[in-house]
Image: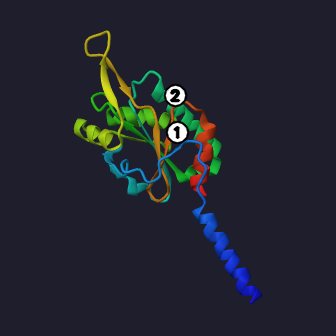
Amino acid sequence: MKKFIALLFLLILCACNQNKKLEFKNTDVTGLGYATDFSLPDFNGKMRRLADFQGKVVLMFFGYTQCPDVCPTTMAELSTVMRELGTLSDQVQVIFVSLDPEHDTREMLAQYVPAFDQRFLGLVGSHQETQKIAKDFKIFYEKVPGKNPGSYTLDHSSGSYVFDKNGRVRLFIRFNQGPEPIVHDLKLLLK
């Protein structure tokens, strides 16, 4: 009888731990009704979907290579996050989705994205594919004319989405908060 009670206690304890809500430092968007999947070619021309990264935590950021501030800052921050995760970083995939298919060629992404970390992957589609993924993920972007003819910048959303190892969207990461809260949350998802 004592063994039965001890076993029952252990089962209840395990069940409670599994149902324990994770205490994220970023915005918990678990159960979000959008941002569920994508289909875009990477900088090697291979079509990618969320399912390709099953078993990894996926961090997805939307930007463009000519961005003067938000994009390089975010990519550098994510590079620091990967270093701080140490060997756990092998279970994380960072994806940079271009919002500027007019200028961001596969060749440009193949140079820009891995410059921050060789494991980072860049995706770029057609204008229609870009519009679709931006709409699906509720990402704002808008072309802003520059001072010279043909030049422009893009105003765009600056946060990132994080998916757990099962491909469920879990977090929205705010811009420019430093690597510590991101590392904290990714470690929770990697457990």
Instruction: State the colouring used for the structure image.
Output: rainbow
Q: Nearest the camera: 18 or 133? A: 18
Q: CA distance from mark 1 to mark 2?
A: 13 Å
SS category of the residue bearing label 2? helix
User: Is residue 91 toward the left or the right of residue 8 in the image?
Assistant: left
Position of the N terminus, as image quadrant, is: bottom right
Q: Nearest the camera: 22 or 85? A: 22
Position of the C terminus, as image quadrant, is: bottom right
For residue 84, above or below residue 9: above
Residue 81 — which label?
A: none
Q: Residues within 10 Å of mark 1 (few under 14, many from 20)?
A: some
Residue occupied by mark 2: 73
Residue occupied by mark 1: 117
Residue 148 percent coordinates (x, y): 29, 10
Q: Earlier in the sequence, mark 1 or mark 2?
A: 2
User: Is residue 163 toward the left or the right of residue 184 in the image?
Assistant: left
**Which residue is drawn at the image coordinates 63% and 64% (left, top)?**
17
Which mark lies nearer to you, 1 or 2? Answer: 2
